[in-house]
Image: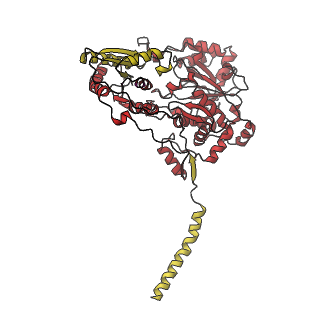
Amino acid sequence: MYNAISIEDFGTPVVLLANPGFVKDAHSAASSKGMPGIRVLPLNVACESTVAAEIEAGTTAAMPGIVEALTKPLTEEEKNPKPAAAEPRRIAFKGDYEDVNRFFYRNGWTDGLPIFPPTEEAVKEMMTGTDLPPDHVVAKVIPRLGKATVEKIAINAVMAGALPTHMPVLIAAVQALMDQRSRFDTFEVSTGSWAPFFAINGPIRNDIRVNYSSGALSPGDIANAAIGRAVGLIVKNIGGARKGIEDMGVIGNPSKYSLVIGESEEESPWEPLHVERGFAKEENTVTLFFPNSFVQSVPRETSAEGIAKSLAAMGPWNMSCLIVIPSHAKVLSDAGWTKKKLRDFVLQNAPNPFPSNQDTSQILSQPPAADSDGLMILVAGGPGAWMAMLRSVGGIENGFITKKIELPRNWDKLVAKYRNVVPVYRGY
Amino acid sequence: MSVVRLSLGAAILAILAIQLPCTETFAQNPEPQYEVLSPWAEVDPVPVRGISSRIQSLAGRKIGLFVNYKRAATPIAAALEKKLKSMYPDAEISSFYSLEWNVTEVETSDRDRFTAWAKGVDAVIMSVGD
């Protein structure tokens, strides 16, 4: 659509053909760039169709509409469109807890779960997690280039149930999203339902209790849950990516609720992810990429080679993360396997996800990860025998993005204040 | 009549005597009210503008086909070209292939070529495969 707008701006009339399911998306994109009148014609051809007869039939049926879209004189509205509706006021609503939740839900501002009301007081407390002023713009988040001010990040963080000690991570997360090399512009809205995955490294993991042990990716830890959830709300309410309108994920992905994990640095025999990526061990970082699949497996043999073979067999390709539990990492390390050796082995032995008789000229048919930069190895998880893989795609000038987490001056005091927000499980 | 009024007055007093304690209890425990901030971000103003004037007919014109990276876009464009040539034998078809994922051509190194192409055709049909 942005290309259509450019062409119209050059004075050349355009008609954009879109599958009926994408027409709303097209209109939203056009409107967001100030050209709501772009003529969009539904084309009854299945998305990404490879069936010639269907394409032929759909195109034939669309021809009268195409001709009309290019020749029918403009309406007054198309010549002089009205400005978009006014933005919501700063104070959006007043009501009791249920009313606030219904209001927010009806405005499309939630993820379907109840939110904490973002009152002035709660947002002010949330902003104690950073020294940046409330109106500081961390980034403009695509697609609508919404200004992710510290205050707006804090509002969404409050809604998600985050603590002020999560704000430094959220600010770094937003910076990572908007790093051009993340290709968030593609993953955010793609039909592939890619979810932002964040690996957290450094002492902050223990300060804010990011789980990197048993059930690290399961619900139950405020840091893992709320940080990811807040990012999802930020993507929606600041970036303006709403499912079915701008976020065109076909199936969707539960990981869009949250996909946040720490690395088990203390139990890992290897150097941590952030040190591999050029940071000092004592620095705090967040590393981002966008997987859409999550696979778990158990090695047939628990020797070093058996573990390595099973990791490879899960089929990582360009832009994947292998989660290796500490006990497996120890077995590998004790047998002389470094992360590099493991990575090289996996790259050489991972199966090609596409059979040889398929057309491999399309970008989705990338061969197994040929680039070691596209394979992350993260040590995390609890006692047991399972391993995991999260898979994205590469080859679109994208890579893992690691950003430093900056802490406020009052960090120690803040950590002390929220340190005891931990679950105490009742025995039975 | 005075007896009726007295009875009525007594009844009213009795009702108030019952209500007042309940009213006080309710006042002590109302539902909390939250004044909440909007999570929806502001954006820089975007100039709203109309679309370009249309052409009178496709006959004898140079029609541009913009083809993106999605799998169906190329065969759709091929089908369009075939149809257009049969409907308008004197029209010229000129295609622009934008095969990188999700790029706005004017923001790439191909900006000049794209601009020249877009300005050099009379109308464009965009095939995006979705």
Q: Is residue A72 above or below residue A107?
A: above
The part of the image, by quadrant, that contains residue B73 is: top left
Tell me if I can see residue A298 in this picture: no
Left or right: residue A76 compared with residue A231: left
- Give coordinates of residue A264: x percent, y percent: 67, 27
Which residue of the protein is positioned furthest toward the bottom in this rendering? B2
- The residue shown at (53%, 78%) is B13
Residue interval drawn in magenta: A8-16
Q: Nearer the viewer, residue B88 or A386?
A: B88
Q: Is residue A13 magenta?
A: yes
Q: Is residue A50 magenta?
A: no
Tell me if I can see residue A78 in this picture: yes
Left or right: residue A192 compared with residue B34: left
- Give coordinates of residue B99: x percent, y percent: 44, 16
The part of the image, by quadrant, that contains residue B127 is: top left
- Give coordinates of residue B54: x percent, y percent: 32, 26
Q: How is the image coloured?
A: by chain
- The residue shown at (64%, 13%) is A341
Q: Quadrant of the N terminus of chain A?
A: top left
Q: Nearer the viewer, residue A281 or A153?
A: A153
Q: Nearer the viewer, residue B74 or A200?
A: B74
Left or right: residue A151 compared with residue A5: right
> What shade has chain B been given?
yellow
Q: Which chain is red?
A: A
Q: Nearer the viewer, residue A140 or A49?
A: A140
- Looking at the image, how many numbered discs can be counted on the residues? 0
Q: Is residue A21 above or below residue B3?
A: above
Q: Is residue B97 above or below residue B42?
A: above
- Give coordinates of residue A10: x percent, y percent: 42, 23
Q: Quadrant of the C terminus of chain A?
A: top right
